Image (cartoon, rainbow, N blue to C red):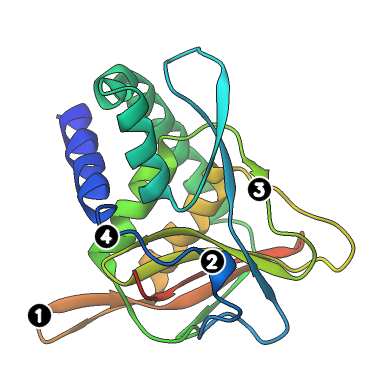
Amino acid sequence: MKSTNILNTLAVLLAGANALSTPLADRSEVAGVPEGYGIVDIEWEVETTPGGPNITLTGTAEQVHAQLVKINPNWDEEFAPIIDKRSAEFDNSLKARALDKRDWIKCGAGHSAARQGAIETGVAYLRTLSGSASRGPGPRNCGRVSCSYDSAIWYCNDNTGHSKSMQWFHIANAAQVLLDACSWESWYFWYVRGERWHNDGWFAIVMGDSC
């Protein structure tokens, strides 16, 4: 059933967070992030209980999920019905966005290939979130949204004059489009690598990374 599948996905996320990667603030550059873009940590506004007040956490989706479960051990079970509803909304939005010809894809971009399954897991977690980054990347900056098993989703601000905080919904959407368009099989394993650019000044990268 759908809730069980989502909870299993979140369990994988939590396992992947056990080996937390180096904070981005300690990394002056990352292979695959376009030249001329800075690197920042992403701040998240998230609920610890359904309908409760938001708190601000910093890190990737996997790191934030680990913190949420530590704060509220019942977080996965309490949010399961909400996750199902948001997933259905996500599917409907994805169909609509597929018709948007103003955005474009560049398969093969980024430093190296990501594992398809790890990116699918990251997308599944982003589907569970409402709201947006409380501090998105500033002008010409990128932040890592998800990273597990050396496979990452990045979100970059292509504007030159202001910060841009995108909804997680749309970042997940962009990563899913790349999964659909830029995946390939090699020796019985599936990989994905590419960039999804949007006409309103931001883009997502799916690629290999260290985590």
Q: In this rendering, does residue 102 appear at all?
A: no
Please name the amino acid that badge 2 sits on: Leu
Query: Which residue is found at the position 33% from the left and 41% from the top?
Result: 66
Q: Badge 1 is on which residue?
A: 188
Is tag 1's residue or tag 2's residue first in the polypeptide sequence? 2
Tell me what residue is drawn at x 49 percent, y 51 percent.
59
Q: CA distance from mark 1 to mark 3?
A: 35 Å
What residue type is disc 4 on? Ala
Numbered label attached to residue 19: 4
Residue at disc 4, secondary structure: loop
- Residue 196: x and y, percent? 56, 69
Circle 2 or circle 3, nearest the eye: 2
Place of residue 24 in the rendered image (x, y in percent of width and height, measured from the top left): 53, 66
Foreground: disc 1 or disc 3: 3
Q: Is residue 34 left or right of residue 109?
A: right
Q: Are marks 2 and 4 in contact (CB under 8 Å)?
A: no
Label 2 belongs to which residue?
24
**Residue contact between numbered discs 1 and 3, judged by CB atoms under 8 Å:** no
Question: Pointer 2 and pointer 3: residues touching (CB < 8 Å)?
Answer: no
Whether residue 144 appears in this view of the structure is yes
